Amino acid sequence: MDFSIQPVLENERVILYPLQEEDFEALYNTASDPKIWEQHPNKNRWQQDIFRTFFEGAMQSKGAFKIVDKATGEVIGSTRFYGYNEQDNSILIGYTFYATSSWGKGINLAVKGMMLDYIFQFVSKVFFHIGAKNIRSQIATIRVGAEKVAEEEVAYIGEASQLNFVYEISKEKWARLKGSN
């Protein structure tokens, strides 16, 4: 891999900073809202000890970000690049969550659009793992332009495996979608 999966990314709405150990408290403050995890396969991630395991997995991935709202300076969530596959020329985006205060405001599209613009300089396909019962995230992923291509059990670090839907978007499709805006 001749590229970074943890650069600083910025647009007019948000900044994605590489996740650091000292970000735990600010990120947990956001993640401690049980409503965030209602549709997620791991519904108890709002609990501090469970979130700590999630956070440690994020740190180990070396591709995780904290998402900061530029207007307020507040940490509003996290996301990451992971699972780079050189042979398939693909990578995954996932483990994304946002503060409920940012729901329905176009933040996900701003974050994912910026991530796709960056990573498509280096790969030809991006996949997303979305919990099978996480309708909210499935809809958000479809809005980005990804299509469901498979179902698979995914084992989160330190957590039981869960059924996920796999969505895919190609570099070419992303370019077409951006060109039509």
Image (cartoon, grey):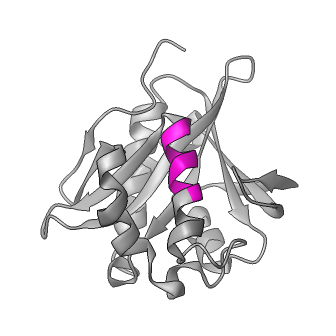
Q: Is residue 59 magenta?
A: yes
Residue at the location (40% across, 83% down)? 100
Q: Position of residue 124 (x, y in %)?
A: 61, 28
> Which quadrant: the N terminus?
top right
Dominant secondary structure (helix, strand or loop) of the stretch shown in magenta: helix
Q: Quadrant of residue 26?
A: bottom left
Q: Position of residue 175 (x, y in %)?
A: 48, 39
Q: Position of residue 71 (x, y in %)?
A: 12, 68
Q: Residue at the far top: name it.
A: 2
In front here: 39 or 159?
159
Q: Quadrant of residue 163?
A: bottom right
> Which quadrant: the C terminus?
bottom left
Q: Is residue 179 visible?
A: no
28 relative to 16 in the view: left or right: right
28 relative to 22 in the view: left or right: right
Residue at the location (57% across, 26% down)? 123
In front here: 164 or 24?
24
Residue at the location (59% across, 63% down)? 141
Q: Which residues are magenta?
A: 53-60
In front here: 87 or 36?
36
Q: Position of residue 68 (x, y in %)?
A: 25, 59
Q: Is residue 177 magenta?
A: no
Q: Residue at the far front: name it.
A: 49
In this rendering, the answer to whether 52 lies above or below 84 is below
Residue at the location (86% across, 55% down)? 153
In this rendering, the answer to whether 72 lies above or below 38 is above
In this rendering, the answer to whether 84 lies above or below 12 is above
Q: Is residue 84 visible?
A: yes
39 relative to 34 in the view: left or right: right
